[in-house]
């Protein structure tokens, strides 16, 4: 069975300072500590996943093409450091427009990944910057780590790798 790190996107992987919706490449800034932390996780054998709510799609603010362009850009930047994201799970819905089963705090995408990629839930962590991220992790039976928006995840990476969390 595999071990994995799940990450929220906006506010964890990239800065959301000054923006509620991040859908333009020019607004997408990778947070301090993300690249070296993801490299350490990857080198330690963790599969990497992103689980992100993108309700702006349902609201008509931006499109899935915009989301996919941001994700392609992110993956290109990570590949420069030999970091591979195993899968990106995106919920394009919003409860005010189209209720669904996949929007966090639902554990739907995490459970899907656990089943599809044969993950050991005891060796999986989710790093998020909102209570709904942590609720999603708890619902899936994995450890949720709540950080402040745009916080450097390096200390949490170290604690996970040292089995302190």
Image: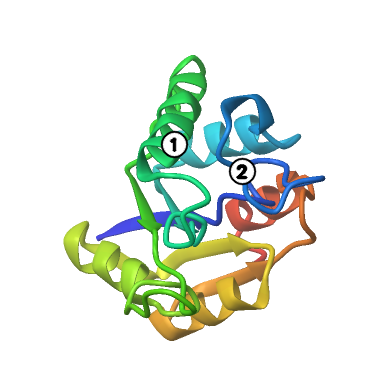
Q: Secondary structure at mark 2?
A: loop
Rendering coords of residue 55 (x, y %): 49, 62
- Quadrant for the N terminus in the image: bottom left
The percent coordinates of residue 89 (x first, y second) are 36, 55
Q: Residue at x 40, y 28 (%)?
A: 72
User: Helix or strand or loop: what does disc 1 sit on?
Assistant: helix
The residue depicted at 33 percent of the width and 78 percent of the height is: 100
In this image, 32 relative to 130: left or right?
Answer: right
**Residue under pointer 1:** 66
- Between 46 and 50, the one lying in front of the other is 50
Please name the residue that numbered disc 2 is placed on: 22
Label 1 and label 2: CA atoms lie apart by 9 Å
85 vs 117, left or right, is right
Residue 93, quarter of picture? bottom left
| Residue in front for this viewpoint, 92 or 15 | 92
**Residue occupying image coordinates x 74% and y 47%:** 19
> What colour scheme has been applied to the protein in the rendered image?
rainbow
Crowding at dot 1, Cα within 10 Å, few <14 / some 14-19 / many 20+, comes out as some
Camera-side residue of 74 and 17: 17
Q: Does residue 136 sit above or below 158 in this rendering?
A: below
Q: Earlier in the sequence, mark 1 or mark 2?
A: 2
């Amino acid at each position: 069975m595999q071990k994995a790190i799940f990450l929220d996107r906006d506010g964890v992987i990239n800065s959301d300072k000054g923006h509620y919706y991040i859908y333009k490449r020019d607004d997408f800034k990778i947070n301090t500590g993300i690249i070296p932390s993801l490299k350490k996780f990857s080198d330690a054998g963790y599969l990497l996943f992103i689980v992100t709510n993108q309700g702006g799609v349902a609201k008509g603010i931006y499109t899935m093409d915009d989301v996919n362009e941001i994700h392609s850009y992110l993956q290109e930047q990570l590949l420069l450091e030999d970091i591979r994201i195993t899968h990106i799970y995106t919920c394009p819905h919003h409860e005010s427009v189209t209720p669904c089963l996949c929007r966090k705090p639902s554990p739907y995408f995490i459970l899907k990944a656990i089943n599809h990629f044969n993950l050991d839930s005891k060796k999986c962590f989710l790093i998020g910057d909102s209570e709904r991220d942590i609720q999603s992790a708890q619902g899936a039976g994995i450890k949720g780590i709540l950080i402040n928006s745009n916080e450097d995840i390096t200390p949490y990476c170290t604690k996970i790798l040292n089995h302190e969390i």
